[in-house]
Image: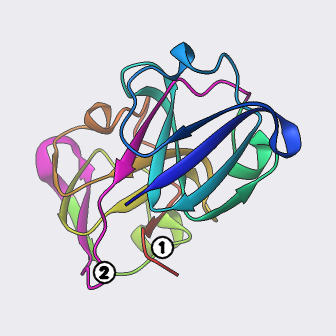
């Protein structure tokens, strides 16, 4: 079971809303979000209703202000719980060209610098074979986040990115 609590104000103050399932429109419950407690589970938060816009992946813990979850502002409009298994394995293939063309590299572990490992920062397509991954816009797990579940992503637009720049990525693990 997953549980998350959203607060209107910083430091867990103000109006709050508890959620234990996917919510496509949080604005019916809260018009801004400045702090969050993730009591259990893994969550993807979205800047816009209907699970779109900037994404933020949160694990169990307390986030007293939106900068703590790398938020750009106090706008969270939808959320989705991630079903996660403890014995999950991880494999991802990234490609420099769309439609799984060009140079390919397979990963089963985190990568803090795509440029260093792949000799390119352009990731135009990928195939997530196993596990859940988080792609980041910049190296060292910074910038925009993109939650990647198993499947084929023929183009960077398939995972919601405005361009083919991926600076780093990591597995979504329980540690």
With 117 as the anchor, is 127 left or right in this view?
left
Q: Quadrant of residue 10?
A: top right
With 67 as the anchor, is 50 left or right in this view?
left
Q: Nearer the viewer, residue 16 or 153?
A: 16
- Residue 108 circle label: 2
Q: Which residue shows up at 51% across the image and 46% down it?
A: 145
Q: Is residue 166 visible?
A: no
Q: Give the residues in magenta.
A: 73-102
Quadrant of image for the N terminus: bottom left
User: Tag 2's secondary structure?
Assistant: loop
Q: Nearer the viewer, residue 156 or 150?
A: 150
Q: Position of residue 69 (x, y in %)?
A: 68, 49
Residue under pointer 1? 111
Q: Position of residue 35 (x, y in %)?
A: 75, 42
Residue 122 is one of the magenta-drawn residues = no
Q: Which residue shows up at 58% across the image and 60% down it?
A: 39
Q: Nearer the viewer, residue 136 or 84?
A: 84
User: Tag 1's secondary structure?
Assistant: loop
Q: Which residue shows up at 52% across the image and 81% down it?
A: 175
- Contact between marks 1 and 2 (CB within 8 A): the answer is no
With 64 as the anchor, is 3 left or right in this view?
left
Counting other residues with Cα less than 10 Å from the Cα at mark 1, is it few (<14), some (14-19), or many (20 or more)? many
Residue 97 is one of the magenta-drawn residues = yes
Q: Is residue 71 visible?
A: yes
């Amino acid at each position: 079971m997953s549980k998350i609590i959203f607060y209107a104000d910083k430091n867990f103050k103000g109006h709050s809303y508890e959620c234990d399932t996917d919510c496509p429109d949080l604005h019916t419950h809260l018009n801004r979000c400045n702090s969050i407690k993730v009591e259990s589970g893994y969550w993807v938060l979205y800047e816009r209703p209907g699970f779109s816009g900037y994404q933020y992946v949160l694990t169990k813990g307390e986030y007293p202000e939106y900068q703590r979850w790398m938020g750009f502002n106090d706008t969270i409009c939808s959320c989705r719980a991630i079903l996660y298994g403890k014995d999950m394995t991880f494999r991802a293939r990234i490609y420099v060209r769309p439609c799984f063309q060009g140079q390919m590299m397979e990963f089963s572990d985190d990568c803090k610098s795509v440029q260093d490992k792949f000799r390119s920062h352009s990731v135009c397509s990928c195939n997530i074979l196993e596990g859940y991954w988080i792609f980041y816009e910049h190296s060292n797990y910074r910038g925009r986040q993109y939650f990647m579940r198993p499947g084929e992503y023929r183009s960077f637009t398939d995972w919601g990115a405005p361009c083919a720049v991926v600076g780093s990525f990591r597995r979504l693990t329980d540690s």
